[in-house]
Each structure stands twice: as C-alpha cells, then as structure tokens.
Image: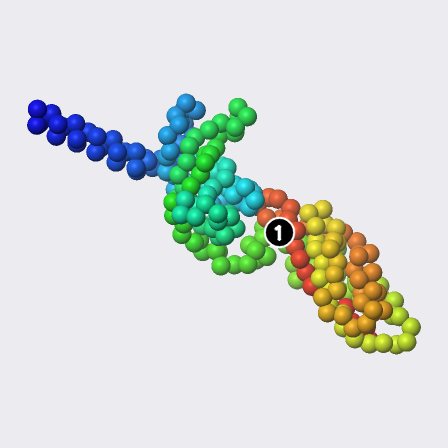
Amino acid sequence: MKRAFIVILFLTSLAMDAFAQPRQLSVRDFLRLSQKDTANYIVKGVVDRVRSTTRGSFYLKDNTGMLLVYGIRDPRDLSRSFTQMDIVKGDTVTVMGRFTIYNGTTLEMKDGRLVSKADGPDHDLSFYDRLEKKPSFRGKEGEEGLEAFRKWVQDHLKAPAGGEKGTVRVRFVIGRNGGVQEVQVTQGVSPALNAEAERVVKSAPKWKPAKSDGSQVRITYTIPVVFE
C-alpha cells in the first residue's frame, strides 16, 4: 500500500511538472500540431518582422520555418504594451502559446506569453536607421532626399513684405502614401514668416514613403526654413 502511494505521488509529481513546464518545439513542429491540441508550447526564434505594434503581432523564425505570433503579453505585467516590451526585428525571443488556424488558412500562435528576450545586434538602432527603405524625394533617398526637399521649399518661398529675416523650424510627417501631413511650426519668428513657411511645406509634392518590413510607414522630419 505504501509503495502504491509512493508510485501515485511520483506520477502526480510528473504530471504537475509537465503542466508547469510546457514542451519546447521548433517552429516546424509547432505548425504541425492539431487544432484540437489546446496545450501551451514554447517556441524560440528570431523576430523576422513586426506585423503590428498595436496588437503585438510579429513573425518568429528559426532554422525550421516561420511562425506568426498573433498578439503577445508579458505575464509578469499584463498591462505592458508591445512597445514597452521593446521587441524589434533581430531580437531573439522565446514565447509560449497555443496553436490555432485562423480563418481556416493562417497557422499561428495565439494567446502568446513572453518567456524571455535577448536583444539582437541592431536593437539599439533608431527606428529610422532600421528602415528597410528611407523616404525619397525626387529620386533622392534619406538625408539627400531631405536636403532636396529643403531646397525645394527654399526655392518656392515668397518673402512677405517688409524684408523681415529669420529661420522658422517646421515639423511635418511623410505619410504612408507619401503625402506631406501634419505640418507644424515648432520654432517661429513672426506670424507672417511662420504662415509662409507652413504654406510652402504644405504645398510640396509627394515623397516616396518609407518602408519597414515590407510595409509603408510614417516618418517625421523637421527642417529650417530660412528667410534672408
């Protein structure tokens, strides 16, 4: 009787350990699970592309394949957003979650939980420096494009009467469609110069938008508009 009790206790302990420590799978093996399998599994890989910072969705890659992690939470603090978790492309991430098939076609991990994260080699680069493609203006990309845009603005200024001089700093957004949006004077000189600087920037032609992980993204710039 005593031996039977010990055996039962041992098996119970094994079962509890199995429940507490989900099995780690490769991406390929995780994607081969049955949709009827509701257990949690652990998968480790490198973030290949961030799909949505709002939902916390990203693609995780190892040497066997690619997995869409549709939403992730930090079990230590469920209030932390994906942005606060500071997960970017190139980071090595271990996640835990359940297998599901969305809409009958998309194989993914749902109810993801962050287990661990190690920063990748490019983790400390700015969002701008990590861009796949920087914005371009009239065939010039990045800083060259920004300088070409600044020159276009200078060439199209109409100096207000009175000969007033000064430098107006203007912030604007290059939208996902390349349009110049959300134009705002951040450092002004006078109502007349501020209005003219804002007018010209708003009237500018479209850029070719920036791209990050295959998707067009918004970029904010600030330029000086000089009245001489």
Q: Mark 1 points at which residue?
A: 133
Q: Position of residue 122 (x, y in %)?
A: 48, 56
Examine the image and state in which quarter residue 119 appears. Answer: bottom left
Q: Which residue occupies 70% across, 53% down? A: 174
Q: Can residue 136 be seen in this view?
A: no
Q: Which residue occupies 44% across, 38% down? A: 112
Residue 201 lies left or right of residue 176; in this view the side is right
Q: Is residue 123 visible?
A: yes
Which quadrant is home to the C terminus? bottom right
Residue 29 lies left or right of residue 85; in this view the side is left
Which quadrant is home to the N terminus? top left
Work out whether residue 65 or residue 33 is closer to the camera in this orientation and state it.
33
Q: Position of residue 45 (x, y in %)?
A: 41, 43
* Placement of 213 over or under 168, stated as above or below: above
10 Å crowding of disc 1: few (<14), some (14-19), many (20+): many
Secondary structure type for disc 1: loop
Residue sticking out furthest to the left: 2
Amino acid at pointer 1? Lys
Q: Where is residue 2 in the image (x, y as percent from the top left)?
A: 8, 27
Q: Which residue occupies 76% across, 70% down? A: 188
